[in-house]
Image (tube, rainbow, N blue to C red):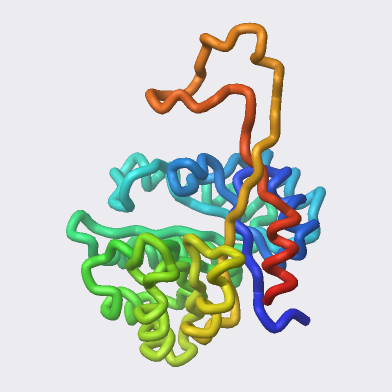
Amino acid sequence: MNQYTLEVCCGSVDDVLEAQRGGADRVELNSCLMFGGLTPSIGTLIAAKKLSSLPIMTMVRPRQAGFCYTAAEYAAALADAEQLLEHGSDGLVFGFLDADGNLDAKRTRELARLAGDKTKVFHRAIDVCADWKRLLGQLIDIGIDRVLTSGLAPDVFYGVEVIREMMDFAQGAIQIMPGAGVNLRNVDKIVEATGCDQIHVARFRDVMDTSTAANRDIFFGGALYPPEDRYSVIDGDYIGQIRARL
């Protein structure tokens, strides 16, 4: 058994397979990682479960930008969560805040109840909340299993002191998992400074797809105009190096 649990943030089935090849212990499955991760498709989950042996946590996030959702968005999130669980998700990753950055306890409790005995993870919405101690206490009361956090910093390396405070505050009542900006240069220091026993990592490499080369004037994305001749996949070799370091 590994001393440290290595979770890899994935946005596709190929990502999951690369994470497994690199020695990951668990994955968080999303879509649209450019927006911080949205709900994955049911087909992606089904294929990932079929082709890999890793526990798969699935994101429940109906849109980018914030965590205060309309009634219609929340209805979609509930429906997605039900389908993800029905098709084998090992846990749900979610986060609901009100317009003032406080926990939406009602919706959080409803998702936790829906997940039942599956793993319940509150994501980095905690990093923008109004009062992390109050929110963390509420999550413990509701029965959330784990929190993913950068320690309220843009990069987890600069949030290690807050993460250490979170772990001291939680006293084992909820798991605290550092993530955001973890790499080979800082993973040792993050683990040492926080005292964590699990960590959340994402590292990608470009893969070429030349099927669009005949007309390079066409873009299918938004105003950022991402290149249409490549896409990102988890770098299994890099994950393997972090696995070995841990």
Identity of the residue drawn at 61% across and 66% down: 184
Q: Quadrant of the C terminus?
A: bottom right
Drawn side of residue 48 relative to residue 170, left or right: right
Give the quadrant of residue 96.
Answer: bottom left
Say which of 231 and 131 sits in front: 231
Residue most extreme to the left:
100
Identity of the residue drawn at 69% across and 35% down: 207
Drawn side of residue 232 relative to residue 241, left or right: left
Provide residue 38's location: percent of width, then percent of height: 48, 45
Provide residue 27's location: percent of width, then percent of height: 65, 59
Provide residue 163's location: percent of width, then percent of height: 40, 79
In the displayed structure, would residue 161 be above or below residue 18?
below
Drawn side of residue 131 relative to residue 153, left or right: left
Say which of 16 and 67 sits in front: 16
Identity of the residue drawn at 29% across and 44% down: 70
Q: Quadrant of the N terminus?
A: bottom right
Identity of the residue drawn at 33% across and 52% down: 67
Give the quadrant of residue 100.
Answer: bottom left
Provide residue 21's location: percent of width, then percent of height: 80, 57
In the displayed structure, would residue 187 be above or below residue 56?
below
